[in-house]
Amino acid sequence: MNPIIQTKIEAQVKNSPVMIYMKGTPQMPQCGFSAATIQAFQSLGHPFETADVLNDPEIRQGIKEYSNWPTIPQIYIDGEFVGGCDIVMEMHQRGELAPLVKQAVEKAAA
């Protein structure tokens, strides 16, 4: 991976309590998986950051290498890779996502 891209991704992941790499933006998701992921996070009421991989092909490829995960969206909470849409939706339905996000946001604010 390009070291500049790796450094950029590392900074985004480490400086954001919740970082979502998605297709499109929260206002205009460009795939159903990204839309579902954003909807789940918006329902939690905590802030999150996003990166539109469609606007940056190097990030699009780089994030797949960084996480060793082939699909988008990719979600990082408190600097750790959580997974993609399916995993996050399962966590949300089981009530596991909300406390994890809350803890990450509160930790970052402290």
Image (cartoon, rainbow, N blue to C red):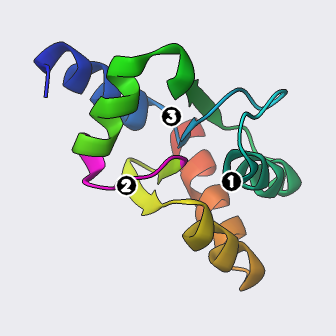
Give the alpha-carbon distance from disc 2 to disc 3, as whole Å: 11 Å
Q: Position of residue 56 (x, y in %)?
A: 45, 16
Residue at mark 3: 16
Q: Quadrant of residue 89?
A: bottom right
Residue at mark 1: 33
Outermost residue to the bottom = 94
Q: Position of residue 97 (x, y in %)?
A: 65, 69
In reply to whether residue 71 is colored magenta, the answer given is: yes
- 89, 55: nearer the viewer: 55
Earlier in the chain: of badge 1 and badge 3, it is 3
Marks 1, 3: nearer the viewer? 1
Q: Mark 1 is on which residue type?
A: Phe
Marks 2/3 in contact by CB < 8 Å: the verdict is no
Marks 1/2 in contact by CB < 8 Å: the verdict is no
Q: Majority secondary structure of the magenta segment?
A: loop
| Disc 1, SS | helix
Q: Is residue 101 left or right of residue 58?
A: right
Q: Mark 3 is on which residue type?
A: Ser
Please, is residue 50 above or below residue 92 in the view?
Answer: above
Q: Quadrant of the N terminus?
A: top left
Earlier in the chain: of badge 2 and badge 3, it is 3
Q: Residue at x 68, y 46 (%)?
A: 34
Earlier in the chain: of badge 1 and badge 2, it is 1
Marks 1/3 in contact by CB < 8 Å: the verdict is no
Please, is residue 83 above or below residue 23 in the view?
Answer: below
Q: Quadrant of residue 94?
A: bottom right
Magenta stretch? Answer: 66-73
Identify the disc placed on residue 80: 2
- 50, 69: nearer the viewer: 69
| Disc 2, SS | strand
Give the alpha-carbon distance from disc 1 to disc 3, as whole Å: 21 Å
